Image: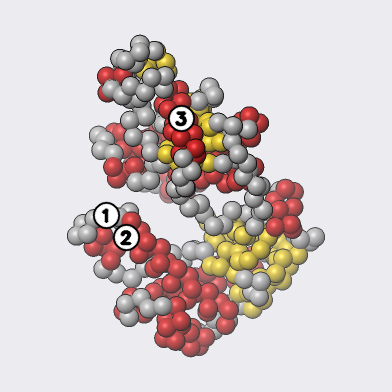
């Protein structure tokens, strides 16, 4: 749950200085870890904790800085093993492995209940800073968010700065509903022209979002070329605007799909698209569209909403789903007459290509569920 802090100028200066101080310390700890071969957290603490305390960091904050660095290296090594940063010997992988991890001055800093306390009635927090404990720092959020915080907040919260504004991202442990036995599956075919198409007939067209992205791309290019102060101010104002709109659209699409599955008593079958950017080879003009496509985010939204509603979700192999007939199962590359039209060379059925693919995915999801196989569901963000 994300809430916006509304600090006074003095409080804002203290928060800004705190984030820069702890992230400078994290960069130093990262250098020590890299030089010593990234030891375990306990050993890394022996080499860095005393020095961190001498710089003026509190005991708990120093512990969090060390843990943040160690967690960052754990994530890096996991990405290396998965091949997400290129093959061994590639320029990208060599660049990543040849230097310690660096932390931005505004990077998030975790706080536990010893360093941060919440006053929900007054909508204020008390938070540790390098200038001392700040009390009465106001925060703003919706009534629903405040209710979630009051009822389900537990564990750490992250302080982060974005565009000069400060936010607290609090961990809320919301109980999941018991997963029920589905009476069938809804297949969800993801795409660029149509963001999502389901086997029940729902189609979320991406034309409006794609047009908006093209306008934003042209605007950024124009402002960057101009390079004046006013152009740079407008560029800063436009930052993350596109991602916020895409996120809002993904929230609405995922809510519609999960609500339909809950209402009809069915599960959801999604495509396993991990690593698609590395697998797919496209021409340069098409790469912008693919890399702007937030399919992983949409999948995460569907997964966490489904868990809260007790709707089962399975991820299936999407191979040849666009070429396979949902009626007879015939697979042929020539079945795809065009991007939107599917005509089976086996049984002659004519259908919308995305709708046909979603029905194929629904059948595969049902088959995986009936076989009792454990679906590989990509891990979602632990902070939700």
Q: In the shown orientation, is residue 381 left or right of residue 1?
A: left
Mark sitting earlier along the chain (3/2) = 2
Q: Residue at x 49, y 34 (%)?
A: 366
Q: Secondary structure at mark 2?
A: helix
Q: CA distance from mark 2 to mark 1?
A: 10 Å
Indicate which disc residue 363 carries.
3
Image quadrant in which you'd find residue 8: bottom right
Which x, y percent locates residue 334?
A: 27, 19
- In the image, 375 versus 63, the foreground residue is 375
- The circle drawn on residue 86 is 1
User: Whole-Å distance between the Cαs marked 1 and 3?
Assistant: 34 Å
Residue 244 in sight from this viewpoint: no
Image: 124 above or below 86: below
Q: Is residue 62 above or below residue 239?
A: below
Disc 2 crowd, CA 10 A, few/some/many (<14, 14-19, 20+): few
Q: Can residue 169 be spotted in the picture? A: yes
Return the residue nearer the eye: 109 or 317.
317
Q: Residue at x 31, y 24 (%)?
A: 331
CA distance for labels 3 and 2: 32 Å
Q: Is residue 292 left or right of residue 62?
A: left
Q: Nearer the viewer, mark 3 or mark 2?
A: 3
Position of residue 315 relative to residue 41, above or below, is above
31 left or right of 261? left
Mark positioned earlier in the residue sequence (1 or 3):
1
- Which residue has dot 2 on it? 81
Quarter in which the N terminus is drawn: bottom right
Q: Residue at x 70, y 51 (%)?
A: 145
Element under label 3? helix
């Amino acid at each position: 749950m994300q809430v916006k802090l509304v600090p006074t100028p003095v409080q804002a200066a203290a928060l800004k200085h705190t984030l820069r101080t702890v992230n400078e310390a994290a960069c130093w700890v990262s250098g020590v870890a890299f030089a010593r071969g990234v030891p375990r957290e306990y050993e890394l603490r022996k080499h860095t904790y005393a020095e961190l305390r001498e710089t003026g960091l509190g005991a708990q904050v120093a512990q969090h800085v060390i843990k943040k660095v160690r967690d960052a290296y754990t994530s890096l090594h996991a990405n290396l093993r998965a091949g997400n940063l290129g093959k061994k010997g590639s320029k990208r992988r060599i660049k990543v492995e040849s230097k310690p991890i660096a932390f931005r001055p505004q990077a998030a800093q975790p706080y536990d209940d010893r360093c941060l306390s919440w006053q929900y009635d007054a909508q204020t927090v008390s938070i540790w800073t390098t200038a001392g404990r700040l009390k009465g720092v106001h925060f703003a959020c919706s009534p629903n968010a405040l209710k979630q915080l009051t009822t389900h907040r537990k564990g750490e919260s992250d302080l982060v700065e974005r565009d000069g504004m400060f936010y607290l991202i609090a961990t809320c442990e919301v109980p999941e509903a018991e997963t029920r036995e589905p009476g069938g599956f809804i297949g969800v075919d993801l795409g660029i022209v149509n963001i999502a198409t389901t086997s029940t007939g729902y189609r979320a067209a991406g034309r409006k979002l794609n047009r908006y992205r093209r306008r934003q791309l042209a605007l950024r290019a124009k402002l960057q070329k101009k390079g004046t102060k006013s152009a740079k101010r407008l560029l800063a104002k436009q930052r993350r605007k596109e991602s916020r709109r895409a996120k809002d659209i993904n929230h609405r699409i995922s809510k519609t799909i999960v609500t339909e599955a809950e209402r009809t008593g069915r599960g959801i079958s999604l495509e396993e698209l991990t690593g698609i950017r590395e697998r797919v080879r496209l021409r340069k003009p098409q790469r912008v569209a693919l890399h702007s496509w937030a399919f992983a985010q949409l999948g995460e939204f569907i997964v966490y909403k489904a868990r809260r509603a007790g709707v089962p979700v399975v991820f299936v192999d999407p191979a040849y789903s666009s070429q396979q007939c949902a009626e007879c199962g015939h697979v042929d590359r020539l079945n795809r007459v065009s991007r939107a039209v599917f005509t089976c060379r086996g049984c002659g059925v004519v259908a919308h290509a995305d709708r046909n693919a979603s029905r194929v995915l629904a059948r595969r999801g049902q088959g995986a569920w009936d076989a009792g196989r454990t679906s590989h569901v990509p891990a979602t963000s632990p902070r939700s």
